[in-house]
Image (cartoon, rainbow, N blue to C red):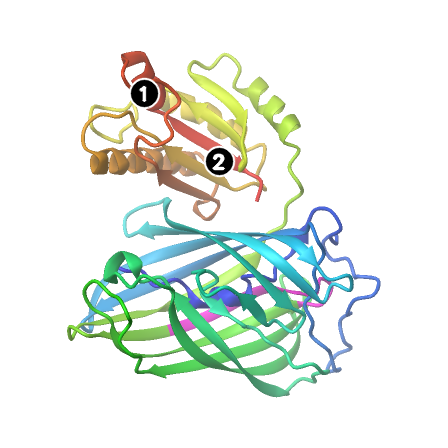
Amino acid sequence: MMTRLPIALAAMISACLAYGQGTLAPNAVPATGPVAPAAGGAFKFAFSYAKGDKFRALSTVDEDVLINRRPAYSSRILDRIAYEVTEAAADGASGSLHGTFETSEMKQGDSAYVISDSYDSEFSRDRLGRYTIDPKYYMPVVRDVPTFPDKELSPGDTWTAPGEERHDFRRVFGIPDPYLIPIDVRYRYIGPVQRAGKAMLQVSAAYTIFERPKEPSAYAEVFPVQIAGFSDQQIYWDPALGQPGAYEEKFDFIFDWSDGSTIEYRGSAHSEVLEAALMDRAALKAEVERAVEGMPDVSVASTDKGVTIRLENVQFEPDSAKLLPAELDKVARIAEVLKRYPDRDILVAGYAAAAGYEAGRKQLSEDRAKAVAERLIDLGARSADHLSAEGFGDSNPIADNATDAGRSRNRRVEITILEN
């Protein structure tokens, strides 16, 4: 079943709180950048970029899906976005960005998110919010939102600007290229507000869609013949940073397909900027190694994502995702370690040995990663919004699958303290 990616994410997708070299400390006012206007005063919105800046955002979507007008299922979707500014103009008026996107879903009855899709993207954006991006990229879903006019704005001012949505319909409908839906966005500058104790500027962004697209050049089964719906967003601009700091959205979209079926996606979304310091991986690795010293089949490594605690030969009940008592104790000790680093998100990855069917190995590794993730959540190591699980089957073996000892090592769970 297709899950609609949250369209509201555009407000945060490439304009979030920066941290690292050359970035501002929280609540700092840039020496030459914009400052908050006096109550009711005019303000000129502009994005700014500095090479080497890193930033991230977390978006949560509560979504109901209706098929042929009848409720089908509900889910909560979590999107983690991490960006780095790879190049920037000397005056900060434009930047080239590399981003990674992870979409996770929590199904009804579950308490942990499972990663369903991962994407990379590269694009540039100017100070007004306009993108230059190769159409081959699936992310960001929404582009050129928000876009600002090149002038000062006073509360009550309105403007319109074009944008677009790009959707990934490969998995379910076999449409191979990012699927384009043009949009026209209506904006209003509401004015200064207080949000979470900070002075911000509120901007509303709304658009409706009524599109009868042409038949795509390639598809496996069906294709959209009509798309209708709306998005209403509230964007909260942080003038001290020159970036949005949060957003809220309500949406409802209906897709009519060529086979006569209808799928509707309705719900709400919100996103907040996350702050973090650069990770000293060597120091963190050493700290974690000391904390897990003496635990059997446990090792620590510095990886491209952060610092990983590897649990080899993890023991579950046969052909299930239920941890044995000895493993529950081990996970409890690791939960206490993770509590020492509350500002870092966690990824739990499950791996299987090469035995049985490939699809079964993939599902079992995902189920076991989710079981460990749910245990960590129950123990208070993280809230669900800051922890995800993913299953990799028998990919990335660390030992020889031809031996019992090698298969035991490959049957593992890796818990990564993420940098970004």
The location of residue 274, given as percent across then percent down, is: 59, 52
Quadrant of res 284: top right
Q: Which residue is mark 1?
A: 325
User: In the rendered view, would you say 155 is above or below 85?
Assistant: below
Which quarter shows the C terminus? top right
Which residue has dot 2 on it?
A: 381
Residue 1, visible in the rendered structure: no
Left or right of 334: which side holds 342?
Answer: right
Q: Position of residue 287 (x, y in %)?
A: 61, 23
Q: Left or right? Give the position of 127 relative to 223.
A: right
Q: Amino acid at mark 2?
A: Ala
Label 1 residue SS: helix
Q: Are marks 1 and 2 in contact (CB under 8 Å)?
A: no
Viewed as shown, does residue 303 lie left or right of 46? Answer: left
Residue furthest to the left in view is: 259
Sequence-wise, which precedes: disc 1 or disc 2?
1
Q: Label 1 amino acid?
A: Pro
For residue 79, the mark is none
Question: In this view of the protein, which residue sits in the foreground, 297 or 324?
Answer: 297
Looking at the image, which is closer to me, 386 or 361? 361
Is residue 242 in the magenta section?
yes
Count neighbours of disc 2 (C-alpha within 10 A) and say few if under 14, some if 14 to 19, many if 20 or more.
many
Q: Is residue 136 visible?
A: yes
- What secondary structure is the stretch in magenta mostly built from? strand
